[in-house]
Image (cartoon, helix red, strand yellow):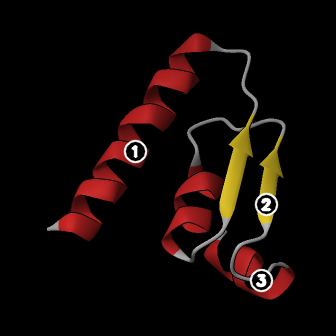
């Protein structure tokens, strides 16, 4: 996903993932300075995505 984000977008762009799943695209987008919007209908995946994003953010801060 990171490669796709880097090839197809510029810093500050908005990345839309209408089938977000575990949030892989959002993690890659945030890592490379892109804004993101996720859509996911399954609550279990929403929670996984939240946890992955929190872990990614904590890794950047640490």
Relative to 40, 28 lies left or right: left
How far apart marks 2 and 1 lie (CA) works out to 19 Å
Residue, disc 3: 10
The residue tagged with tag 2: helix, strand or loop?
strand
Camera-side residue of 23 and 32 = 32
Labels 2 and 1: the sequence-earlier one: 2
Residue density around tag 1, few if under 14, some if 14–19, many if 20 or more, within 10 Å: some
How far apart marks 3 and 2 lie (CA) works out to 9 Å
The answer to which quarter of the image holds residue 39 is top right
Q: Which mark is residue 52?
A: 1
The answer to whether marks 3 and 1 mark residues whose Cβ atoms lie closer than 8 Å is no
The residue tagged with tag 3: helix, strand or loop?
loop
Q: Select label 3 or label 1 by which is in front.
A: 3
The residue tagged with tag 1: helix, strand or loop?
helix
Across and down, in percent, residue 26 comes to 60, 53
Q: Select label 2 or label 1 by which is in front.
A: 2
Q: How many marks?
A: 3
Residue 27, compared with residue 38, is above or below; it is: below
Identify the residue shown where x is 65% and y is 35%.
Answer: 21
Relative to 37, 47 lies left or right: left
Q: Which mark is residue 25?
A: none
Q: Quick one: which residue is furthest to the bottom in this view?
A: 7
Quadrant including the C terminus: bottom left
The answer to whether marks 3 and 2 mark residues whose Cβ atoms lie closer than 8 Å is no
Residue, disc 2: 14
Camera-side residue of 55 and 21 = 55
Across and down, in percent, residue 49 comes to 50, 36
């Amino acid at each position: 996903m990171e490669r796709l984000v880097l090839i197809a977008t510029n810093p500050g762009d908005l990345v839309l993932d209408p089938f977000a799943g575990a949030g892989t695209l959002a993690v890659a987008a945030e890592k490379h300075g892109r804004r993101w919007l996720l859509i996911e209908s399954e609550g279990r995946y929403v929670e996984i995505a939240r946890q992955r994003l929190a872990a990614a953010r904590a890794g950047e801060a640490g």
